[in-house]
Image (cartoon, rainbow, N blue to C red):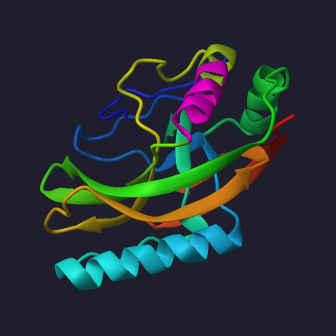
């Protein structure tokens, strides 16, 4: 992600540049994502609570409505253009990929600064998610198609790690991808646009 005075933006969109202290985070982040249906989100929440209890974690699970698998970032900064959704739509409307099943079957942790990120990963849906991400990277000319992309769904930010382990599979059919507006630091996400997988 970006920091300081840098802002990530879509080609053709020039943001108004404002001075910020280097350590001050961006206020708004827009990214493409896959979101679970309500049943899968509920199951993910149950998995987060179970792991929190078993490992004595101090973190609080994300709100179920905020669960997602991140795809390319398209904006990170203070003031997004009013026509951002329209611009992204013009870029991704030609992406064609059929709906596919997502199966999250592995819990693991990533180290992030002074905390750990507890996530659900997949051993069964990797190719489909990689494929969609690659199409969207090419369409938006944003993000990266590098091997470092690891599909996952964040459950909570914890004070200590959880060992990698299989979990009861959480499944849903990915029938669309969405544009999410994250209000950074507020735990608030809004879905501002949707595109069907077809």
Q: Is residue 65 magenta?
A: no
The residue lying toward the viewer, choosing from 179 and 58, is 58
Determine the image quadrant of residue 71: top right
Tell me where the magenta segment starts and ends, as one range. 125-135
142 sits left or right of 108 in the view:
right
Residue depicted at x 77% and y 21%: 91
Residue depicted at x 57% and y 53%: 103
The residue lying toward the viewer, choosing from 168 and 196, is 168
Residue depicted at x 68% and y 35%: 81
Measured as percent of width and height from the top left, residue 109 is found at: 25, 55
The residue lying toward the viewer, choosing from 39 and 14, is 39
Determine the image quadrant of residue 48: bottom left
Residue 57 visible to the viewer = no
Vertical position of residue 166 compared to residue 135: above or below: below
Quadrant for the N terminus, please: top left
Vertical position of residue 51 compared to residue 172: above or below: below
108 sits left or right of 41 in the view:
left
Q: Is residue 127 magenta?
A: yes
Quadrant for the C terminus, please: top right
135 sits left or right of 3 in the view:
right
- Count of numbered circles in the view: 0
Determine the image quadrant of residue 136: top right
Vertical position of residue 70 compared to residue 52: above or below: above
123 sits left or right of 117 in the view:
right
Measured as percent of width and height from the top left, residue 149 is found at: 41, 30
Magenta: main secondary structure: helix
The residue lying toward the viewer, choosing from 193 and 5, is 193
Residue 69 visible to the viewer = yes
Measured as percent of width and height from the top left, residue 185 is found at: 40, 61
């Amino acid at each position: 992600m970006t920091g300081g005075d840098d802002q990530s933006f879509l080609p053709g969109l020039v943001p108004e540049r404002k001075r910020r202290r280097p350590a001050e985070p961006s206020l708004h982040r827009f990214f493409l994502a896959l979101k679970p249906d309500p049943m899968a989100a509920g199951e993910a929440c149950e998995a987060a609570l179970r792991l929190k209890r078993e490992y004595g974690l101090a973190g609080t699970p994300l709100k179920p409505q905020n669960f997602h698998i991140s795809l390319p970032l398209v904006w990170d900064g203070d003031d997004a253009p009013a026509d951002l959704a329209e611009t992204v739509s013009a870029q991704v409307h030609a992406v064609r990929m059929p709906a596919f099943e997502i199966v999250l079957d592995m819990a693991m942790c990533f180290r992030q600064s002074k905390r750990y990120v507890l996530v659900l990963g997949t051993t069964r849906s990797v190719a489909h998610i990689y494929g969609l991400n690659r199409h969207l990277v090419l369409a938006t000319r944003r993000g990266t198609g590098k091997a470092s992309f690891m599909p996952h769904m964040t459950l909570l930010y914890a004070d200590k790690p959880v060992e990698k382990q299989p979990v009861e599979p959480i499944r849903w059919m990915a029938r669309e991808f969405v544009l999410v507006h994250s209000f950074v630091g507020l735990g608030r996400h809004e879905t501002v646009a949707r595109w069907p997988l077809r």
